[in-house]
Image (cartoon, rainbow, N blue to C red):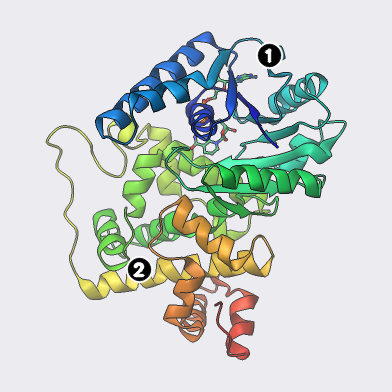
């Protein structure tokens, strides 16, 4: 039974995770190296809770309860009696490993030691521990209090008991858990790659401009944000780095090949909203292009991006990265897709998926467009995902 939770790193993710655990009634110890980061986290939670009061979602007593559940600490030893610690510090393997060694020396033997890493392997971090069976990945999405999905990643060393306790705890915090294999990008950051990559490819080939692609994906595809708007929102530097890291982690599989367009924007400092300029210009009164509202073109754009997303989801299932249900939940609850991709494949028809992918492969003869063996097998056996 998890009661006391330690969160290490009080930045964007750590602050959100601490809020989630405290709201669920856990006592939380929130640690950071930097006292400014702790103060910022405390101030930002205060503002978030005040906004929730204004909206009538919580009352003053609830605000006090959540705040009183969090203790901001500057001494790592104060984590000693935690049942679970979740690390959300800088994304650097050596620094994380050193922290994990230190944690192991001060926590009880039964405590679970988790990481919120998005790009490192959980096995490599667990390798720092004498008893790696109690290490696991717990990957939240930003903003952690709002996003329903949490990916739980057992490493090869993780025990069944650690996995079970973690899944039960995170589910009891009101989150949707998707258990995933310890492979690059886990579910969401792997399966979502074509949303950006294929949109960039369509743009780079000159098939449509960014405004038209975004318009197509929203109005015809039903996505909440277009790929370019979303990249500008995430930050082109951040999004490019994730793509590049997934690409290298998959031994340069061309399916994940990054785009020079995004690299150049990132190099130029056109990072998106945060720098005032990305694919779009966010300056006051800036002139941005209007979409070409051609529904035939829009349908072709959506079909191409969608079939590449479906292929990625089917391949993740083929390689047993997660169950069909968890893959679909991950995309609807982690990145707000309008439908699960495997359910969407059923709706479009497996024949449609295979023939679209084969059409792209015929045209380009690139490995990027190879159809997942699972889709081909399902077509042969006349099967659906659900
Ligand atoms: P951040 O930069 O906002 O916060 C990191 C915090 O860790 C800072 O307050 C820093 O002072 C502190 N810190 C750095 N080294 C430390 C150490 N050795 N001991 C204690 N505190 C230390 O970073 P963010 O975005 O919150 O990311 C944290 C982790 O979560 C990373 O591993 C990242 O890959 C992962 N992640 C990030 C997501 C995002 O959207 N930002 C989403 C999911 C995971």
The quadrant of the rendering that contains the C terminus is: bottom right
Image quadrant of ligand 1 equals top right
- Find residue 307 and report its horizontal and vertical position in percent: 46, 71
Res. 118 image quadrant: top right
Q: Tag on residue 88? A: none
Res. 265 image quadrant: top left
> Which residue lies under the disc numbered 2?
302
Disc 2/disc 1 C-alpha distance (Å): 52 Å
Res. 86 image quadrant: top right
- Find residue 254 and report its horizontal and vertical position in percent: 58, 60
Horizontal side of 218 relative to 354 (left or right) equals left
Tags 2 and 1 touching, CB below 8 Å: no
Q: Tag on residue 78? A: 1
**Disc number lying in front (2 or 1):** 1
Q: Residue furthest right?
A: 130
Horizontal side of 343 relative to 90 (left or right) equals left
Q: Please tell me how crowded label 2 is: few (under 14), some (14-19), or many (20+) other residues with Cα within 10 Å.
A: many
The one nearer the camera, 68 or 333, is 68
């Amino acid at each position: 039974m998890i009661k006391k939770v330690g969160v290490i790193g009080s930045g964007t993710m750590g602050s959100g995770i601490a809020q989630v655990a405290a709201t669920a009634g856990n006592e939380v110890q929130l640690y950071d190296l930097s006292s400014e980061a702790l103060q910022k986290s405390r101030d930002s939670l205060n503002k978030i809770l005040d906004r929730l009061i204004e909206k009538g979602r919580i009352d003053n007593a609830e605000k006090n309860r959540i705040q009183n559940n969090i203790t901001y600490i500057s001494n790592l030893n104060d984590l000693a009696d935690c049942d679970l610690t979740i690390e959300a510090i800088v994304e650097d393997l050596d620094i994380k490993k050193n922290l994990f060694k230190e944690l192991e020396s001060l926590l009880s033997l039964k405590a679970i030691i988790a990481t919120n890493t998005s790009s490192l392997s959980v096995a490599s971090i667990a390798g720092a521990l004498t008893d790696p069976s109690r290490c696991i990945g717990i990957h939240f999405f930003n903003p952690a209090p709002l996003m329903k999905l949490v990916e739980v990643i057992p490493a090869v060393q993780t025990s069944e008991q650690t996995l079970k306790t973690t899944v039960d705890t995170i589910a009891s915090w009101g989150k949707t858990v998707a258990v995933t294999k310890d492979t690059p990008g886990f579910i969401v950051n792997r399966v979502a790659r074509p949303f950006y990559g294929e949109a960039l490819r369509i743009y780079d080939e000159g098939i449509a401009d960014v405004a038209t692609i975004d318009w197509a994906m929203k109005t015809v595809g039903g996505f909440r944000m277009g790929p370019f708007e979303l990249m500008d929102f995430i930050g082109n530097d951040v999004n490019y780095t994730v793509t590049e890291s997934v690409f290298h982690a998959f031994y340069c599989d061309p399916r994940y090949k990054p785009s020079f367009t995004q690299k150049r924007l990132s190099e130029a400092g056109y990072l998106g909203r945060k720098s005032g300029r990305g694919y779009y210009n966010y300056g006051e009164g800036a002139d941005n292009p209007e979409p070409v509202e051609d529904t035939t073109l829009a349908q072709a754009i959506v079909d191409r991006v969608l079939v590449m997303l479906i292929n990625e989801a089917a391949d993740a299932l083929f390689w047993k990265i997660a169950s069909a249900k968890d893959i679909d939940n991950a995309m609807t609850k982690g990145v707000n897709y309008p439908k699960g991709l495997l359910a969407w494949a059923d709706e479009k028809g497996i024949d449609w998926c295979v023939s679209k992918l084969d059409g792209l492969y015929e045209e380009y003869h690139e490995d990027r467009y190879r159809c997942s063996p699972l889709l081909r097998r399902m077509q042969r056996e006349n099967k659906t995902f659900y």
